């Protein structure tokens, strides 16, 4: 009963935030290959500003007031990143570049309760950066290889990580006090990377980048209850639509967006998007999805009613991580 209650609260907190964000705004896009962040007017597709970041920016999160972006600078293949860029989105200016050493390869990043949570892939942990004190003030090891993506509840009492190297999902919950944490490690398929929690808070879906499958995790039971064989070549990101009706999966090597009906767990459609589709973002109004097509230097806009691409916006070289700003 306790687990069901906390999962329900997680879903409600996400819903409240979605409702408060509105239906129009700006798209924040990271271009990995040129190490920039761009802000795009969603209505016109016009790039409003471009800011240099650290090398290999992969994921971005935005403060609750929409003024500040936090960028995880993952680095390059030969040079692991060790910084987070803090960017003023109105002035289009990097305020500071935070050195998080000895942490390496910051990747997944999420803002919750005024703090910035991020994974340090090499160190196998989740860390927390406090923008007010400009310090990393908390660390929690996962004990899992390749802790890559992270999702945190708005009250920061629950978090989930995808651990690519260990083929697991971690469910991490705060215990009786802020210093007590409990972790449940759930084995899934090979190379879990993109994942999301359903809007009702009951399930977590994790896409396997190495075996073409998707694991469906029951969050009350904390175990896999279904595995879908979608035969993707290299799934990269996975997102539920706002109404929970569909699940979108980017297949990087196939150049496709795979659409799955969440209730029947059957594939609905595959859209050819171009070379290397990666990040997926669904804005608060839930009518469209933005998919970063890294190999073509653009973001594709998908109408979630017709499941057709309605436009493509050029943003820079190697777009991937995205965020939404009202």
Image (tube, rainbow, N blue to C red):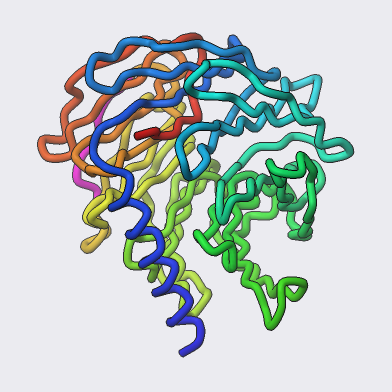
Where's residue 98, x and y in %? 76, 30
Q: Can residue 251 be seen in this snapshot?
A: yes
Q: Residue furthest bottom?
A: 1
**181 is higher (above) or lower (below) than 13:** below
Secondary structure that dominates the magenta span: strand
**Residue at 73% across / 42% down in the picture?**
121
**279 is higher (above) or lower (below) than 210:** above
Where's residue 5, x and y in %? 44, 82
Q: Can residue 164 be seen in this snapshot?
A: no
Where's residue 149, x and y in %? 59, 46
- Please check the rendered image and state whether residue 120 is part of the magenta-colored stretch, yes or no: no
**217 is higher (above) or lower (below) than 64:** below
**Residue at 31% across / 50% down in the picture?**
20
How many numbered marks are there? 0
Camera-nearest residue between 39 and 73: 39
Q: Residue furthest right?
A: 102
Where's residue 63, x and y in %? 52, 41
- The residue segment tinted magenta is 267-273
- Please check the rendered image and state whether residue 268 is part of the magenta-colored stretch, yes or no: yes
**Residue at 47% across / 54% down in the picture?**
206
């Amino acid at each position: 009963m306790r687990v069901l209650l906390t999962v329900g609260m997680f879903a409600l907190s996400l819903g409240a935030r979605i409702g408060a964000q509105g239906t129009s705004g700006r798209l924040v896009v990271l271009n990995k290959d040129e190490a920039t962040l761009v802000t795009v007017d969603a209505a016109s597709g016009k790039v409003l500003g471009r800011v240099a970041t650290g090398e290999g920016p992969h994921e971005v999160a935005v403060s609750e007031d929409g003024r500040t972006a936090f960028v995880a600078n993952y680095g390059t293949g030969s040079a692991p990143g060790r910084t987070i860029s803090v960017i003023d989105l109105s002035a289009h200016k990097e305020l500071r570049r935070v050195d998080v050493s000895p942490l390496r390869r910051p990747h997944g990043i999420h803002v919750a309760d005024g703090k910035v949570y991020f994974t340090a892939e090499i160190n196998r942990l989740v860390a927390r950066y406090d923008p007010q004190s400009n310090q990393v003030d908390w660390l929690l090891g996962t004990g899992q290889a390749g802790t890559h993506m992270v999702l945190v509840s708005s009250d920061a009492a629950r978090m989930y990580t995808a651990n690519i190297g260990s083929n697991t999902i971690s469910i991490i919950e705060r215990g009786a006090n802020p210093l007590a944490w409990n972790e449940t490690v759930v084995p899934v398929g090979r190379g879990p990377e993109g994942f999301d929690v359903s809007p009702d808070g009951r399930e977590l879906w994790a896409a396997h980048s190495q075996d073409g499958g998707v694991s469906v995790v029951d969050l009350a039971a904390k175990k896999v209850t279904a595995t879908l064989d979608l035969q993707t070549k290299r799934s990269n990101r996975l997102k539920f639509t706002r109404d929970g009706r569909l699940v979108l999966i980017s297949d990087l090597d196939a150049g496709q967006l795979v659409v799955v009906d969440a209730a029947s767990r059957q594939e609905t459609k595959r859209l050819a998007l171009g070379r290397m589709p990666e990040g997926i973002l669904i804005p608060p109004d839930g009518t469209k999805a933005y998919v970063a097509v890294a190999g073509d230097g653009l973001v594709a806009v998908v109408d979630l009613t017709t499941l057709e691409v309605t436009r493509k916006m050029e943003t820079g070289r190697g777009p991937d991580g995205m965020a939404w700003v009202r």
